[in-house]
Amino acid sequence: MLKGFKEFIMRGNVVDLAVAVVIGTAFGAIVTALVEGLINPLVAAIFGKADISKVWNFDVNGAHFSIGKILQAGLNFLFVAAAVYFFIVMPLNKLAERRKRGQEPEPAPLTTDQELLTEIRDLLSARR
C-alpha cells in the first residue's frame, strides 16, 4: 500500500502540480500588489473612491448591491490571465518555436515522377 502511494507521489505530474500551486500562490501575491499599489490608486484618482469595489454600490429595499465588487473581480481575473499569458505562456510558445526551427521540416510528398524514379533506382540496386 505504501509503495503505491510513493509511486503516486513521485509521478511527474503530481510534483509539477505541487510546484504550480506554490508558484501560483506567489504569483498571486505579485498581482495583488500590482492591483493594490497601482490599479486601485488609479481608480481612486478617477472615481474618487479607494478602489473599484466601492464604486456603484446601492441599496434596494434593504438589499445591498455592489457592481464595483464584480468589476474588481473581473479586473483581477484579467490581470492574472494577462500576466500568466505574457510571462509564462508566450515565452514557452516562443521556446517551442525555437526548438521546432532546429528540427528538419517534414519532406513534401513525392511527385509521380519522383516515385517512378525511386522505383527504378530500387529495381536497379536490387539487380546488382
Image: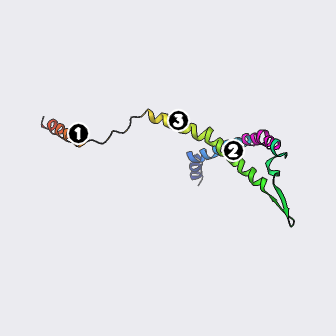
User: What residue is shown with label 1?
Assistant: 114
To which residue does mark 2 refer? 79
Under circle 1, the secondary element is helix
Residue type for callout 3 = Leu
Question: Which element carries disc 3, helix, strand or loop?
Answer: helix
Between 35 and 66, the one lying in front of the other is: 66
Give whichever of discs 3 and 1 has the lower sequence position: 3
Q: Is residue 31 magenta?
A: yes
Taking 48 as reference, is 69 above or below it?
below
Q: Image quadrant for the N terminus?
A: bottom right
Q: Quadrant of residue 108?
A: top left
- Amino acid type at circle 1 is Gln
State the residue in front, 119 or 69.
Answer: 69
Where's residue 47, x and y in %? Answer: 82, 46
Asked whether disc 2 touches disc 3, contact meaning CB atoms under 8 Å apart, the reply is no
The residue beneath circle 3 is 95
Instruction: Give the extent of the magenta segment.
Output: 30-44
Residue shown at 18% from the left, 36% from the top:
121
Residue 9 at x, y = what percent? 60, 48
Q: Exactly how many numbered labels are in the figure?
A: 3
Residue 121 in view:
yes
